[in-house]
C-alpha cells in the first residue's frame, strides 16, 4: 500500500519516496518482498501516483512481476486493498505490506506466512506502552484454568480460580480501530501492525464484504478479521517484540528516528563481525559494506553503493566513500571523497589517500600509491608506487609505476568537444605547475620541468622544459598611487 499523501511530511515528494539509508522507503519494502520470493508485487498508488510508479519501476529488479493499482479517492486501507484484488490470483498467499514501514525483517514475514499456512488469516501484532491511534487486537477469552490452591485456601474459592495472562494463545476475534474502541478496548496494548497474510481467494471474498459504517466512514482492512471469524476461518496473531520493525513514517522526526535505528543495527552487525567503529552513533551506511579483519572506521563516515574494505584498512574521520574496493592495509585519511559510480573505483594494497582527496569514477590506484590533499583523479590508472601528493588533477590518464606527479600539475584532457588520454611512463618525474595537453605520451624515465606546458610527446629519459625564458629587470619600481 503506497497511496497516502503523507501530509505531516510537509513535502511535495510522496511519502513513500522519502529515503531511509539512501533508499526510498518503498524500495526497502519491495526488496524485502523480493527476498521472500514473491511471485507478484502489486503496488497500490494514489497521491503522486505517476511519480511513485515511475520510481518503483526503477527500483524493482527484473525478477519481480510488478503491477500497479490506483486508489482514487483514498477511502481507507480496506479500500486500498480492494483496488489490488482484481489483479491477484485466487491461488497462493497474499502478504499485505505498507510502503512506509521499511524496517520489517524478512524472517518476521516468513514466520507470518508460515502462520497463515494458506488457510488462516495471520496478523502481525506487537504490544506498545502507548497504543493510542492503533487498532486493538480483540482476543477470545482464554479457558479458565485451575491453578494450584494455596495451603489452607478452600478449593473453588475466587483465589483458586484465576485467568491466565492474555497473549498469543487466545483466539483473535476482531480488530477494533482506536476511534471505534470503548474504554476497555483502548486499555488493550496489543495492536495490529498493518501487516497480514491471508489465503488469496478468501481475502478477495472478505474484501467484498467490507463496509464503511464506522467513525471515519472508511473501509477498514482490519474488518476482515471479524469477517473471517464469522466465516469460521481461524485468525491467528504472530506477535513480535521489536516494535521498530513495524514503525511507520508519518513525519520527518519519525523518519529520522527510523534512520538512527537502522544505522545502529548496521553498526552493531559490523562490530559483531570485528569492525572497529570509533563511535557507532556517528556512522552511516547507505548501501552495502563488506569488511575484512581489523578494519577501523573513524567518526562521521558515510558509505554508499557497494564498498569492500580489505584486511587492516583504516578510514579516517568524515570520509564519504561509494562504489569502491579498497585493498588490504590501505589508509584513507580524513575528509576524503571517493565515488566510483557505475564504473567503480579501486585502491590498491598499502595505498595512502587524502586528506581532502577526491577519487571519481574509473580511478584505479595500484599498490603503495600515494594520493594527497586536494588531488582529484578521474578515469585514470596509477600503477604501483606512483605519487601525486598534493594540489593536482589526473583525468583520463595512464600513469606508470613510481611516477612522481608534482603539485599544481594537471592533465588537460578535454578540448571542448572530446576527451583525450595522457600516458605517463614508468619512473617519470613531473615538476610542479605543469600542464600536460592530451593526447600525449611522456616517455618512461623522463622529467618535465616545473611550470611547463607540454603539447608534444616526449622520448624516454628526456628532460622536457616548455616555458617562456625568464627575464629580470633590475631595480624595477612598481607603480604608485598618486597622492590625494
Image: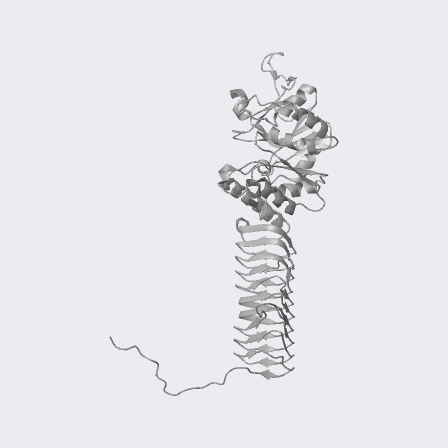
Q: In the image, is residue 431 above or below residue 37? A: below
Quadrant assignment for the C terminus? bottom left
Q: In the image, is residue 138 above or below residue 367? A: above
The residue sitting at the right extreme is 91
Of the pair 423 and 45, the residue shown nearer to us: 45
**Hey, which quadrant is residue 244 in on the image?**
top right
Q: Is residue 483 visible?
A: yes
Could you tell me residue 2's position as x and y percent?
60, 37
Q: In the image, is residue 418 above or below residue 82? A: below
Residue 120 shown left or right of residue 416 in the figure:
right
Residue 455 shown left or right of residue 252 in the figure:
right
- Which residue sits at x=45%, y=86%? 471
**Hey, which quadrant is residue 165 in on the image?**
top right
Quadrant assignment for the N terminus? top right
Could you tell me residue 446's position as x and y percent?
62, 81
The residue sitting at the bottom extreme is 474
- Which residue sits at x=66%, y=43%? 31
Q: Is residue 239 visible?
A: no
Could you tell me residue 404's position as x and y percent?
59, 75
Of the pair 343 and 211, the residue shown nearer to us: 211
How was this image coloured?
one colour
- Which residue sits at x=58%, y=54%? 303
Amino acid at each position: 500500500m503506497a497511496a497516502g499523501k503523507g501530509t505531516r511530511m510537509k513535502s511535495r515528494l510522496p511519502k513513500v519516496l522519502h529515503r531511509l539509508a539512501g533508499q526510498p522507503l518503498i524500495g526497502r519494502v519491495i526488496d524485502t518482498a523480493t527476498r521472500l520470493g514473491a511471485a507478484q508485487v502489486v503496488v497500490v498508488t494514489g497521491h503522486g501516483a505517476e511519480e511513485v510508479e515511475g520510481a518503483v519501476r526503477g527500483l524493482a529488479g527484473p525478477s519481480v512481476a510488478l503491477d500497479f493499482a490506483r486508489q482514487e479517492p483514498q477511502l481507507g486501507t480496506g479500500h486500498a486493498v480492494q483496488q489490488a484484488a482484481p489483479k491477484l490470483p485466487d491461488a497462493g498467499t497474499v502478504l499485505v505490506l505498507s510502503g512506509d514501514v521499511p524496517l520489517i525483517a524478512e524472517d518476521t514475514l516468513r514466520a507470518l506466512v508460515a502462520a497463515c499456512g494458506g488457510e488462516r488469516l495471520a496478523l502481525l501484532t506487537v504490544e506498545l506502552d502507548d497504543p493510542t491511534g492503533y487498532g486493538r487486537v480483540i482476543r477470545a477469552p482464554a479457558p479458565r484454568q485451575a491453578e494450584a490452591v494455596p495451603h489452607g485456601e478452600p478449593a473453588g474459592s475466587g483465589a483458586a480460580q484465576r485467568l491466565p495472562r492474555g497473549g498469543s494463545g487466545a483466539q483473535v476475534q476482531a480488530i477494533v480501530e482506536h476511534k471505534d474502541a470503548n474504554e476497555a478496548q483502548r486499555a488493550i496494548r496489543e495492536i495490529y501492525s498493518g501487516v497480514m497474510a491471508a489465503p488469496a481467494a478468501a481475502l478477495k471474498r472478505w474484501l467484498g464484504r467490507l463496509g464503511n459504517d464506522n467513525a471515519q466512514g472508511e473501509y477498514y482492512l482490519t474488518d476482515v478479521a471479524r469477517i473471517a471469524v464469522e466465516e469460521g476461518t481461524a485468525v491467528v496473531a504472530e506477535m513480535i517484540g521489536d516494535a521498530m520493525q513495524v514503525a511507520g513514517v508519518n513525519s520527518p522526526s519519525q523518519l529520522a528516528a527510523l534512520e538512527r535505528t537502522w544505522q545502529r543495527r548496521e553498526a552493531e552487525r559490523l562490530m559483531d563481525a570485528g569492525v572497529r567503529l570509533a563511535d557507532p552513533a556517528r556512522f552511516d551506511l547507505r548501501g552495502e559494506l563488506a569488511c575484512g579483519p581489523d578494519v577501523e572506521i573513524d567518526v562521521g563516515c558515510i558509505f554508499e553503493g557497494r564498498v569492500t574494505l580489505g584486511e587492516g584498512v583504516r578510514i579516517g574521520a568524515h570520509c564519504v566513500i561509494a562504489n569502491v574496493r579498497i585493498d588490504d592495509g590501505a589508509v584513507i585519511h580524513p575528509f576524503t571523497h571517493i565515488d566510483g559510480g557505475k564504473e567503480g573505483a579501486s585502491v590498491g594494497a598499502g595505498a595512502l589517500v587524502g586528506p581532502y582527496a577526491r577519487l571519481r569514477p574509473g580511478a584505479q590506484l595500484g599498490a603503495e600509491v600515494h594520493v594527497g590533499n586536494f588531488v582529484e583523479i578521474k578515469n585514470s590508472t596509477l600503477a604501483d608506487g606512483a605519487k601525486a601528493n598534493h594540489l593536482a588533477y589526473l583525468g583520463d590518464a595512464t600513469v606508470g609505476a613510481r611516477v612522481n606527479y608534482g603539485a599544481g600539475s594537471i592533465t588537460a584532457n578535454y578540448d571542448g568537444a572530446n576527451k583525450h588520454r595522457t600516458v605517463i611512463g614508468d619512473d617519470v618525474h613531473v615538476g610542479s605547475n605543469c600542464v600536460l595537453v592530451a593526447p600525449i605520451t611522456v616517455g618512461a624515465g623522463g622529467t618535465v620541468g616545473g611550470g611547463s606546458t607540454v603539447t608534444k610527446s616526449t622520448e624516454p629519459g628526456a628532460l622536457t622544459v616548455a616555458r617562456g625564458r625568464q627575464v629580470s629587470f633590475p631595480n624595477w619600481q612598481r607603480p604608485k598611487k598618486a597622492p590625494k
